[in-house]
Image: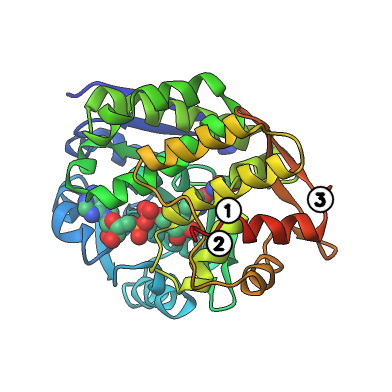
Amino acid sequence: MSEHTTLNVDLGERSYPIYIGQNLLDQADILKKHIPGNSALIVSNETVAPLYLKKVEALLSGIRYESVILPDGEQYKNLEVLNTIFDSLLTHRMDRNTTIIALGGGVVGDMAGFAAASYQRGVHLIQIPTTLLSQVDSSVGGKTGVNHPLGKNMIGAFYQPRAVIADTSTLNTLDDRQLSAGLAEVIKYGLIKDAGFFDWIDQNMNALLKRDPQALAYAIEVSCQTKADVVAADEKESGQRALLNLGHTFGHAIETGMGYGEWLHGEAVGAGMCMAAKMSALLGWLDETQVQKTIAIMQHAKLPTTAPDSMDEQQFLDLMSVDKKVIDGVLRLVLLKNIGDAVVTKDYTQEQLAKTIRISYAT
Ligand code: NAD
Ligand code: GLY
């Protein structure tokens, strides 16, 4: 029996636990107690399945299960590939009491979650995130969906899982670039809400990059607790949940503009947070030292800090105008009043936004 931490996402009758610890995929009781019926569909991908599918299957004795293996990559997070999950559910006669188990990173989690939200108008969902990014962010909070060629995550639903099982041992097989991408979302929590956590990340970056288990466990726990608190207060993003999108409007434009999968989500968000910091300075909110601290922590995490040269200013502006934070034609941006203090604002000029893009290129 391994030790683990359990956090709670407090959503009344729809509350659910987040289990965080090593070797959780060796413990049948945790997964099985969250499966209400006698059937399950495991959704994974061609990279994660060879590593962990057998482990999950071994936990499902007595349950009729099938699996569907998706192609790997952000470019496959679309309606066509989503349909293969429905094909599998129907082919295997999975009924309304079925549990969909998402085994993989954020792409698998978002797609399996959307399938669970919409199959027969909603079946049970369990998230087993296997990337740092999905363990600290995407598996928690119920945002599910797919991309559209014209915009990132534009089609989807809020749909909460019954449990999140974050086995931190799975991070041992993650490559370094993906680890850094996950660190972007960890840094995000420090930047938006918790200056002390930002400093802790800064001081412990080498340990995090070396995958020190204690440092990673602490970073994941603080991140999940922050996300759980925000989601409990504002599940459907009518207020403070939007703060979790710091850097995302710039980042989503980069992901879409460069072609899905070219820049990793976390990389685009890392550069996007640097752009948000620069814009916050243009508005007179951050001082230059804080901007440089933001850029330095991204560099330390081995994340990009500048906008891609191949995207011009107009392309950025066009893509940002289809962001989900556009309300009645006005784009809200998440910016920083301070490190540890983010706000959602529409109090900026188009010229300030355009200038932010211009000053964010490396050259
Ligand atoms: P990902 O799902 O593409 O996974 C990254 C890569 O790592 C993939 O190649 C995957 O196959 C591989 N992988 C996964 N687990 C592994 C393991 N243990 N060992 C080795 N390889 C492994 O990317 P991601 O960074 O996990 O997630 C990004 C996605 O999450 C984006 O689509 C983003 O939009 C979404 N997202 C959603 C939310 C949300 O709230 N729903 C929040 C943040 C991000
Ligand atoms: N990743 C942003 C959110 O979950 O709201």
**100 is higher (above) or lower (below) than 185:** below
Give x and y (percent) for residue 34.
38, 40
In the picture of the structure, the residue carrying the numbered disc 1 is: 248
Find disc 3 in the rendering and name its residue.
348
Residue shown at 76% from the left, 42% from the top: 283
Q: Are marks 3 and 1 in contact (CB under 8 Å)?
A: no
Q: Residue at x 63, y 68 (%)?
A: 316
In this picture, residue 266 sits left or right of residue 47: right
Q: Is mark 1 within 8 Å of ligand 2?
A: yes
Earlier in the chain: of badge 3 and badge 2, it is 2
Image position of 84 with respect to 39: above or below: below
Lateral position of residue 346 relative to residue 122, left or right:
right
**Cα distance, mark 3 to mark 1?**
17 Å
Contact between marks 1 and 2 (CB within 8 A): the answer is yes
Dot 2 lies on which element? helix
Is label 3 or label 1 in front? 3
